[in-house]
Amino acid sequence: MTLHNKYPTAHYRALDAAHHVHPFSDTRALNAEGSRIIVKGEGVWLTDSDGNRILDGMAGLWCVNIGHGRAEVAEAVQRQMLELSYYNTFFKTSHPPAIELAALLAEIAPARFNRVFFTGSGSEANDTVLRLVRTYWATLGKPDKQVIVARRNAYHGSTVAGASLGGMGPMHKQGGLPIPGIHHIAQPYWFGEGGEMSRDEFGLWAARELEKAIDAIGEDKIAAFIAEPIQGAGGVVIPPDTYWPEVARICREREILFVSDEVICGFGRLGRWFGSEYFGTEPDLMPIAKGLSSGYLPIGGVMISDKVAAVLEETGDFNHGFTYSAHPVCCAAAIANLEIIRRDKLVERVADDIGPYLRERWLKLGDHPLVGEARMTGLVGALELVPAKPSRRRFEGDGKVGLKCRDFSFRNGLVMRAVGDTMIISPPLVISHEEADELVRLAARTLDMTHDALKAEGLMG
Ligand SMILES: *Cc1c(COP(=O)(O)O)cnc(C)c1O
């Protein structure tokens, strides 16, 4: 057993509890329990400070598409650090990494996307989206088109605009969100909210909620509709087949912009470069982050279609930007990452090889007595935990079963995340067949252990 840490686990835990406030965490509960200290990453594997190996079923936070520890990215970053570690792009200046990355993205993206605005994260990308879509309509002489339609249980980041566009109840409860001018409609989550409707009926119904919102609020007031191709943080909500074609029809017929939040689905996750390509929608803007750099350094952006870019040219100054917009070292990391994705054909691999391979095995977990539905598209999947199949009724207790399952999973050496009682995975795109087998084996064992524990507590059936 090789230890990669300088200090023993207890020392790190004590300092972490004393000084570090974690995102999306109950500070007191976490400090009492102590966090797990991750010290090393290689491929799909993590190592903790006690020397345990853990299969990273979530690719960090949906981002490490090329796997952990790729020396080529580190070398590109080091070269760029030594060459030009920082310069801004505000005042009539630019630099090679920003230019090369922008051109590379234009090459990768659908033909009508030829421009990108860089940010430091996905949240900043969606802040940019909010200002961009309103500025677009104001420039066209329609300043009343301000309202952005989004969906309940969507995730668009954690800044004020990102959290407001998102539809997460617990986030809205803190800090006075959402801000005005954002309207949330239903999500296409059939398993949880489909009621008596068939999947396809429900998909159409959920899509037409957009049309109803446009009619109710007034097309002259609506700036844009924003949505993730597949909702990630909301629990890997894969819409019914009828959903996206109907949304695409509505967006074509109505005078609104369509924003496809590609922060998770972009860069190969669904077996295409962008999730909107997988579903055949035609967005006007695409926020990106996460897989853009595989998380090696923080960078995001907004891909801007020619239609929006042409109007933006009429705007004059767009009074918006970040110190770290197009940070040269982050751009260098993103370029190295995209080159690996292209060279190793990771997008094609998800479509034709590892995607179908893992999906076939993952869907079999749907036979487990605890699993009401197993679903997967590309390399993103979910398991719905239920007390009594085939009913879609949920457990009492608001996600306690999911947390129990997540803890078993971690102890078994697999990172699965829990969203309520939905277990989700989103592994690195480089995961091998053997590692995919191992992932499914560990998930099955985790389900067995969770099932046994629930039975012992009398919670099954
Ligand atoms: C993670 C995420 C964001 C926010 O990105 P950050 O880099 O965490 O700010 C936005 N949209 C989606 C769909 C995401 O999954």
Image (tube, helix red, strand yellow):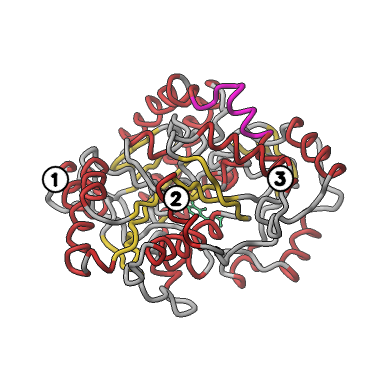
Label 1: few (<14), some (14–19) or many (≥20) C-alpha neighbours in 10 Å: some
Where residue 193 appears, as percent x and y from the top left, is: 23, 55
With 184 as the anchor, is 417 left or right in this view?
A: right
Q: Is residue 271 above or below residue 417?
A: above
Q: Amino acid at mark 1?
A: Glu
Instruction: Look at the image and tell me whether residue 50 can be seen.
Output: no
Labels 2 and 3: the sequence-earlier one: 3
Q: Are marks 3 and 1 in contact (CB under 8 Å)?
A: no
User: Which residue has dot 3 on it?
Assistant: 48
Give, as a single range, the part of the protein colored magenta: 336-347
Q: Amino acid at mark 2?
A: Ala
With 116 as the anchor, is 339 left or right in this view?
A: right
Judge whether residue 341 is colored magenta: yes
Query: In the image shown, does 231 or 116 lie closer to the viewer?
Result: 116
User: Which residue has dot 2 on it?
Assistant: 310
Q: Are marks 2 and 3 in contact (CB under 8 Å)?
A: no
User: Which residue has dot 1 on it?
Assistant: 201
